[in-house]
Image (cartoon, coloured by chain):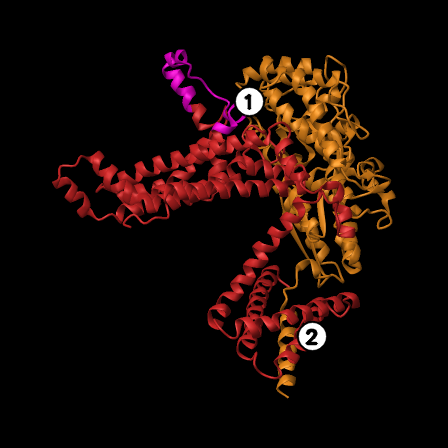
Amino acid sequence: MNPIVASLTEVFQMVFFVLWSVFLVEAYLYLHFKKYEEKWFTPAMLAGVPLAGLVYAITAVGPAIPGSIMAAIAMYAFLVELAAIPFFKLVVRGRYSLPLMMIAPGFIGLAMLIAYPLVFEFYLAFHDLKLTTLKVWAETGSIPFMGFQNFVDVFVKSPLSEVTFWRLLLRTLGWTFVNVFFHVVGGFALALVLNNEIKMKGLYRTLLVIPWAMPQVVAVLAMRGEFHSQYGFINVMIERALTAMPWLAHLGIQKVEWLSQHPFLTCTMINVWLGIPFMMVVILGGLQSIPKSYYEAASIDGASAVQKFWNITLPLMRPVLAPAVTLGTIWTFNNINIIYLVTGQAGGTEEADILVSALYKAAFTYNRFSYSAAFAIVIFAILFLVSMLWLKYSKGTDSAYG
Amino acid sequence: MRAGKFLTLLAFSVALCGCLKPVRSEDDPNHITVWEQEDSTVAPYIDATLEAFRKLPGNERVTVSRVHYSNEDLRQQYQTAAIAGTGPDLIMCPSDFGGVFAVAGFILPVDGLFDLSIYNKAVMESVLLEGKHWGIPTSNGNHLMFMYNRKFVKNVPQNTDELFKYCDTEAKKYGLQNCLAFDGGEPFWFTPWLGGFGGWPLDKRTPTLDTKPMREAVDFYLDLRYGKKVIPQECDYNCMDALFKEEKVAFIINGDWSVFSYAGSLKDNYAVARIPMVSKTGLWPSPMVSGKFFMINARLQKDERKLKLARELIKFYTNRENQVRQVKELKRLPSLTEANTDQSVVGDPLLKASMEQILVGKPMPMATEMRPTWDSMRQYLGKIMTRKVTAEEGITKMQQDVSTKIGEMNR
């Protein structure tokens, strides 16, 4: 079969499979919501659900499926249904049938995509999966139990070669603060300019959005090239400036080996450039929603431009800024792309690593899977805490007009 | 009665759902997926060979798909896929990938599946681990060589003194900003020089980094960059490749995988030689030698039909006819002993030079300890070359770091 036709067939098959699965879930729920009082309900369900499990296993995997697995499927399906029947008969009793049937497919999908990996993450964090235990795990399904050792190791052992967890944490907080700060300040400044009546505003807006609109990989790799010490745009410009104005050299201006001497600074500069357009667009949207009458009233009262900004613009922008800054903080904190693409994929330097890039290297360069699982949980806890504190103290969830 | 109808309907619905379950390409016994990390210029050759296999009598229902990854991405992606019990049926990669994959149980040993005696013995040794072979070679080499542009170089330097003399005189006459380019951040490019000073990163399974040859090789490396200034600053693979293709450097150290591409862009000006002898020691730099290999996903052990198809594909890919065609089209040395004597091999000056380089090379270690050794070398060579630590301090830490990593791996 033609590969394109084969791929399309696979996609359509997948779509049909998902739709049919949703139908089955809905049919199951319909019976449990609407027919739970029928006489035949309990025996039919207790027989039907294990049978359905077996039929599905045989049709999906094939008749060669081992008897022990068939028995296990039937037994677990029976036990699940045995618990489900009293729940639907005594607790649910047909209530909330429509909303629950509506959210059920989404809930099951999310459970499979998020809950299962999360549970597995915790399992890994308390066990010892690494290169040398992979084979044992694949053959026996079990790996040595480690208790909290991996969590202790996160704080006392370097995930890479030298850099410690605490240094990575400090660097990540600095990276997040500096980036988000410049994103907001730069985005705010540009949005204020674009919010005025200026000629060719649409063109400026389009040009300013380009770094954000183009694929991040392309933008980052292009910028990486511009920071090359010999052939990059920045050093070429410095060289030309020094040729034209040799006195600049006396001020300490000289070509810089950006990528090897200052990898973290280079990553930060690239990410600041990339992040400003998003903030600009969000803030511009917020600015345009502020009624002009507020400014007109302030003008009549004799308020200066600074007073208008401080007393009208900033408070009314809070509901827009708070979620944008929260999102920006989470994205920047977790932004592995810039570090990965700028400092090299094969390990590279540790000097620009933040928590998530160190986590990636620990897992996929150094094959420390269980350690990385514990590391990921620690990072999640930090990010959760920082976000909650920010939302609480910024009062970002409060209404501006409330 | 209603219950009976219900059960029938339910069974029918579930059976339909089971039938609709998407068939993964890896479950299709007539489909082979190959992941590779080759240069983009090699892709047409691979595709043509896979297509020729597909057109063989009896293979009408066979389909083969090729997926490209960069070197590190292939290693990481395959590892991730293999952990989940999935991934491609075959991978094409250098031998050093095999060590990790073999220990983790991601690939099958090929002993008993193929007649290994038909392949060059030296190449097969580079995939020998714990008494088993873990891949079938498609080419011999995958080694670094000294390549130059005849437009700038009339007499190729035989030793480093001659190289420095050229760089100091003739290269400047041609207005070349730099004389020699190579990927200074990758330890793979460092090992030939380490060999030129009498060292090697691994002694069987023990890293040997904190040594006198390592100190001398590092000093030499620093001298190339900061003293003699014959290599560009911050030059990675793409940078060195572009500099050579754009005729901005006279020499490049690159692998046999790039010969085809350079021969195409520089035409008759392109030539290959041995990496110049280290004048101080009188030793030839010794690049790591292995080849490119087909490795078989361990998943195929439970799928006889697919394993048979994968074996047929590998045998076809490495038969004499394709090995000779590979020599002609990609300028790579064959892995099949029978193809060594073909006129296309013995009569080609580029391949002759490639063989000359292999003669002073050393087999690439397949031991799992090589992986952390690469990682530690990359980390500390980077620090030394950017002068963030002294050579002495960097080398000591490099050895300590690799010992720690191996300790953790074997804990």
Residue located beneath label 1 in the image: B233
Dominant SS of magenta comes to helix
The chain painted red is A
Quadrant where the N terminus of chain A sits is bottom right
Residue A31: where, in percent of width, then height?
A: 56, 77
Label 2: few (<14), some (14–19) or many (≥20) C-alpha neighbours in 10 Å: many
In the image, is residue B270 above or below residue A92?
above
Q: Residue furthest bottom?
A: B1
In the image, is residue B162 above or below residue A308?
above
| Residue A257 within the magenta-colored segment of the rendering | yes
Q: Who is closer to the viewer here, A125 or A361? A: A125
Residue A24: where, in percent of width, then height?
A: 58, 72
Q: Quadrant of residue B94?
A: top right
> What hue represents chain B?
orange
Residue located beneath label 2 in the image: A51
Residue A174: where, in percent of width, then height?
A: 47, 31
User: Which chain is indicated by disc 1?
Assistant: B
Judging from the image, what secondary structure is the residue with disc 2 in?
helix
- Give me the disc on residue A34: none
Instruction: Give the distance between the C-alpha atoms of the residues marked 1 and 2, in whole angstroms.
Output: 69 Å
Q: Who is closer to the viewer here, A354 or B374? A: A354
User: For the magenta stretch, what is the residue range?
Assistant: A237-265
Disc 1 marks a residue whose amino acid type is Gln
- Does residue A102 appear anywhere in the picture? yes
